[in-house]
Amino acid sequence: MLFRNLCSVFVLIAIMLLSSCKTPKDIAYMQGFDQGDVQAVVSQRRITLQPDDKVSIVVSSKDPELARVFNLSVAQVRVGQDNVSSLTSNSQVSAYTVSPDGNIDYPLLGSLHVAGMSRMEVAKMIEAKLLKDGYLKDPVVTVEFLNATISVLGEVNSPGEYPISRDNMTLLQALGKAGDLKITGMRKNVLVVREENGKDVAYRLDLTDAKSLMESPAYHLQQNDVVYVEPNDYAKRQSVVNGNSILTPSFWISIASFLSTIAVLITK
């Protein structure tokens, strides 16, 4: 009877060890998206200016002297050898900060409402005003974000704040900047927190499901988005002493060895 019970224990341990060796299905990204497949992506929403955003605005023209007034260079204080300070300027263009009302104060054109506009829309608006008011005949305006960032936190290899280098950065590209997920990161429940109309809105995305991922409104990130990758159950148990010991093969091998020793002692 004792021998039969021990055999049952050994069989159970063997089954548990074999099951622990099976390949997990929640690791690979974008499952179900195979060669030649086509998946619709949620309409790309280009980054738009928001209060407190900083942008650089550069105006070019065939007449650089006329365009110079619209390119405010940054003044710096330089102290000479005789301890006399003087103002110098460099080629860096100063930043325009969007006010809480959504405006910027632009040379000669005055207050411009830019909140909710993409950088291309702002550029076209300024070009049109420069032409209409007769300041320049051939203006070319370039607008770039200076402080548009996203934050990536949690179970990634390099958490931190990262600049948005393009208007349609995806969640996968942002995770790539952060060095990808650790093996202990939950791929099926990535959280994106976004401020919308003065409120924080949470989006949950499954990196393993290509369809739901690409159709999510948070697939393309916006400035100030916060991406959080939660730890999986194994990582959570690691915060507790011996939390994962019972799941390791060495633990069950030790149990089997202990039971074998007891069986030998009993049968003597």
Image (tube, rainbow, N blue to C red):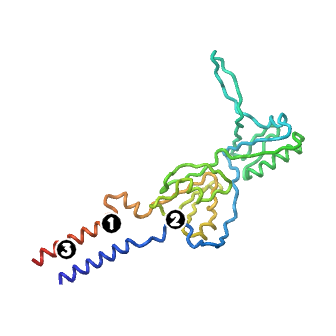
**Circle number at residue 260:** 3
Residue at the image position 48 percent from the left and 71 percent from the top: 25
Q: Quadrant of residue 225?
A: bottom right
| SS category of the residue bearing label 2 | loop
Q: Amino acid at mark 2?
A: Asn
Up-down relation of residue 8 to residue 252 (above or below): below
Number of numbered markers: 3
The alpha-carbon separation of the residues under discs 3 and 2 comes to 43 Å
Outermost residue to the left: 268
Q: Quadrant of residue 86?
A: top right
Who comes first in sequence, dot 1 or dot 3?
Answer: 1
The alpha-carbon separation of the residues under discs 1 and 3 comes to 19 Å
Verify CB contact (< 8 Å) between mark 1 and mark 3.
no
Quarter of the image with the C terminus is bottom left
Residue at the image position 67 percent from the left and 57 percent from the top: 168
Residue at the image position 84 percent from the left and 43 percent from the top: 139
Instruction: Report the front residue among 70 and 110.
Output: 70
Q: Which residue is mark 2?
A: 189
Verify CB contact (< 8 Å) between mark 2 and mark 1.
no
In front: mark 3 or mark 2?
3
Q: Is residue 21 left or right of residue 215?
A: left
Q: Which residue is mark 1?
A: 248
Q: Is residue 108 left or right of residue 197?
A: right
Q: Amino acid at mark 1?
A: Thr
Residue at the image position 85 percent from the left and 43 percent from the top: 130
Who comes first in sequence, dot 3 or dot 2?
Answer: 2
